[in-house]
Amino acid sequence: MNDKQLRPTELPIPELAAAYVQAGETLFLALHDDIAARVRLAHPEAAYLEVSLHTPGDAELHGIWSAQEPGRDTCRLLYGPHNGASDDWQDGPLDLDELVEDLGRILSHSLLQRWGVVQPHPLYEHRNRRRWVVLPPADRAATVAEIVRRHIPDAESLICRFEADHGGIAVGFEQLTLSGGKTVSIPCPRCLPETDDSPWPHDVSHELAHLLGQLYALPHLRSRHLTPCADFTSDHEGHLWQLVFPYREPDSTEATRS
């Protein structure tokens, strides 16, 4: 007979703590996605929110910014407060009072910090007070594929390991599948910390881990984009999942080779 499944309150303390953190991350990421959707309804080009948090839950919006434009080192200000003007509560379809209230919620806890969506302000003079809230890409899976293919152009899929603990969800890279079926193992930084065989730089690993962790943490994205894989060889904990990249037409060079 199968053992009775434990209720959350019956879990050992470490597992209960991990479940609590993971649930919090899921909730805050979902709020973050909802904020992004509302902001982009008014400003489709929005990429960043400039925000300060005076006390827990008390946020102030200083601006809505675009991403950096090609050939420029600065972002474009899409919306800025009007120094207390009476219409400041509304920005087209965007209710700014609701937006600021929700920003106060997600910034009052550190759960979003680990995903890279709350960053220091790009201007040094504002770093003590203000934060740069990064809005998620419209399609995280496509963004992961785009980043990977900058370094491995013929990559077709990525296999990752996700491990939940009291600190959140850790992401490990296991294997790339290339066009034609060839596979490339990705060295584990725990086992080979000094290796130079990684297919991309260290900062790219962080960028990918943030996006992949969000895909895994949000149940609707996990079920849509990630497929569980069997793992019979590794000693590491966690489960393997495969992200299949969107189909891409081969360029003329690849077509000639084939």
Image (cartoon, grey):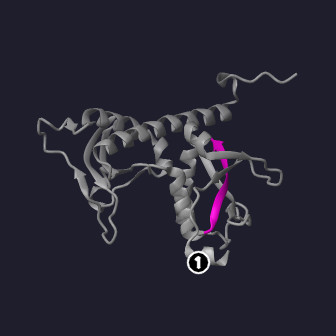
The answer to whether 223 is drawn above or below residue 176 in the figure is above
106, 1: nearer the viewer? 1
Image: magenta residue range:
154-167
Residue at x-position 66% and y-position 78%: 257
The residue positioned 66% from the left and 31% from the top of the image is 13
Please state the horizontal and vertical placement of residue 210, each as a whole percent of the image.
53, 52
Which residue is labeled 1 in the image? 253
Q: Is residue 42 left or right of residue 175?
A: left
Q: Does residue 63 appear to the left or right of 138 in the view shown?
A: left
Residue 60: % across, % down: 26, 41
Q: Indicate the position of residue 144 as horizontal and vertical percent values.
A: 54, 57
Report if residue 218 is visible in the image.
no
Q: Position of residue 193 (x, y in %)?
A: 67, 66
Residue 211 appearing in the image: yes
Residue drawn at point x = 46 percent, y = 47 percent = 113
| Quadrant in which the N terminus appears | top right
